[in-house]
Image: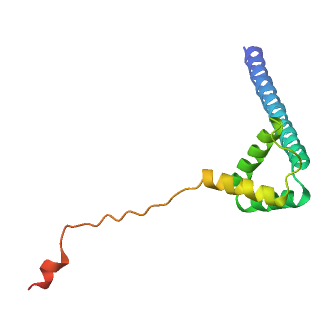
C-alpha cells in the first residue's frame, strides 16, 4: 500500500513539474511573439517616417501612449495598403495627429444637480 501511495505522489509531482515547465515555455513563446511584433512595427515605422517624425512620435508615446499607439496603427495600416507616397515628415505627422485628435476628441460636459430640499430664502424671512 505504501508503494501505491508513493507512486501516486510521484505521478502527481511529475504532472506538476510538467505543467510548470509547459507554462514557462508558453510564456517564453508569448514574449518572443510580442518582441517580433514590436520589431516588425518599428521596422515599418522606420521605413515610413523620417527621423524628426519618429522623434516626435516617440515623444508622444512618452506622454500619451494610447494616442501614439493609435497613430502607429494608422500609419502601419496606410503603409500596408500602399496609401503612403514616401516618407512622412514631421509636418505630415502633425497633420495625422490632428486628424486622430479630432476623431478621438472627448467633449466634457458639466451638469449641476442642485438639491431643492430646503430653500435658504424661507429661513431669511423670520
Q: What is the x, y in percent for residue 33? A: 84, 35
Q: Who's the residue at 84% across and 32% down the image?
A: 25
Number of numbered tags placed on the structure image = 0
Residue 5 in which image quadrant: top right
The residue shown at (81%, 31%) is: 26
Q: Residue at x 78, y 17 (%)?
A: 7
Viewed as shown, does residue 55 lie left or right of 62? right
| Quarter of the image with the C terminus in it | bottom left
Here the colouring is: rainbow
Q: Is residue 54 left or right of residue 126?
A: right
Q: Decide: is 88 above or below 20.
A: below
- On screen, 63 above or below 81? below
88 or 38, which is in the foreground? 88
- Which x, y percent locates residue 90? 83, 60
Q: Quadrant of the N terminus?
A: top right
38 relative position to 116: left or right: right
Residue farthest left in this picture: 126
Percent from the top left, x then y, of residue 125?
10, 84
Residue plotted at (83% across, 39% down):
37
Q: Left or right: 107 with respect to 74? A: left
From the viewer's perspective, is residue 125 above or below residue 94?
Answer: below
Of 120 and 69, nearer the camera is 69
x, y percentage for residue 36? 87, 38
Amino acid at each position: 500500500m505504501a508503494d501505491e501511495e508513493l507512486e501516486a505522489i510521484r505521478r502527481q509531482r511529475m504532472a506538476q513539474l510538467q505543467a510548470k515547465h509547459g507554462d514557462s515555455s508558453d510564456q517564453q513563446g508569448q514574449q518572443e511573439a510580442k518582441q517580433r511584433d514590436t520589431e516588425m512595427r518599428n521596422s515599418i515605422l522606420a521605413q515610413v517616417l523620417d527621423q524628426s517624425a519618429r522623434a516626435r512620435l516617440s515623444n508622444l508615446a512618452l506622454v500619451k501612449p494610447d494616442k501614439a499607439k493609435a497613430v502607429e496603427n494608422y500609419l502601419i495600416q496606410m503603409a500596408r495598403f500602399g496609401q503612403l507616397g514616401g516618407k512622412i515628415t514631421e509636418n505630415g505627422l502633425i497633420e495625422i495627429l490632428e486628424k486622430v485628435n479630432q476623431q478621438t476628441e472627448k467633449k466634457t460636459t458639466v451638469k449641476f444637480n442642485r438639491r431643492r430640499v430646503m430653500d435658504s430664502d424661507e429661513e431669511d424671512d423670520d
